[in-house]
Image (tube, helix red, strand yellow):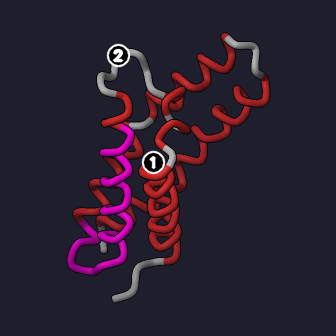
Amino acid sequence: MSAPTDVKLLSGLFAASGAVHLVRPQVFEPLMPPYVPAHREVIVGSGVVEAALAVGLLLPGTRRAAGWGSVAVLLGVMPAHLHGVQSARRAGNTPMTVGHLARIPLQLPMLRAALRATRS
């Protein structure tokens, strides 16, 4: 059975994000909260996880597990989004603050798609 359109889109987002995590991990370092150890390793590891979830969301046999994994990842990165907002605000960087704030509500349709995948 083919994945629903929103699950396919989530898969594409995870694939793209995972690739950036692996190829340009320094992009994500400013988002890392200070209490997270080994920033570079966590970023690269999360890229591997996102790439695996991207594939898993497309395969009927792994879609349900990948859906739950996607929910966990999306909830798990929320502290990084909040840290990004706080850091940009402290730096007085309004465009970055707005950009980080905009990412937070975008998590909702992504979470909805991930939850749909758990029912596939």
Q: Residue at image x 30%, y 74%?
A: 120
How far apart are the two marked residues, 2 and 1, measured between alpha carbons?
19 Å
Q: Quadrant of residue 85?
A: top right
The overriding secondary structure of the stretch rendered in magenta is helix
Q: Is residue 45 above or below residue 83?
A: below
Q: Counting other residues with Cα less than 10 Å from the Cα at mark 1, is it few (<14), some (14-19), or many (20 or more)?
A: many
Magenta-tinted stretch = 43-64
Q: Quadrant of residue 65?
A: bottom left
Give amino acid for label 1.
His
Residue 63 within the magenta-colored segment of the rendering: yes
Picture coordinates of residue 69, whole percent (x, y): 28, 54
Q: Nearer the viewer, mark 2 or mark 1?
A: 1
Front residue of this view, candidates 4 and 31: 31
Picture coordinates of residue 113, whole percent (x, y): 45, 62
Whichever of labels 2 and 1 marks the residue nearer the N terminus, that label is 1
**Which quarter of the rendered picture does the N terminus lie within?**
bottom left
Picture coordinates of residue 63, whole percent (x, y): 28, 71
Give amino acid for label 2.
Tyr
Residue placed under numbered mark 2 in the picture: 35
Say left or right for 102 vs 80: right
Q: Is residue 120 above or below residue 100?
A: below
Q: Quadrant of residue 45?
A: top left
* Dot 1: element: helix
Q: Residue at image x 38%, y 39%?
A: 43
Picture coordinates of residue 79, whole percent (x, y): 44, 27
Q: Residue at image x 67%, y 39%?
A: 102
Residue 59 within the magenta-colored segment of the rendering: yes
Q: Residue at image x 30%, y 22%?
A: 37
Say left or right for 98 vs 110: right
Residue placed under numbered mark 1 in the picture: 21
* Dot 2: element: loop
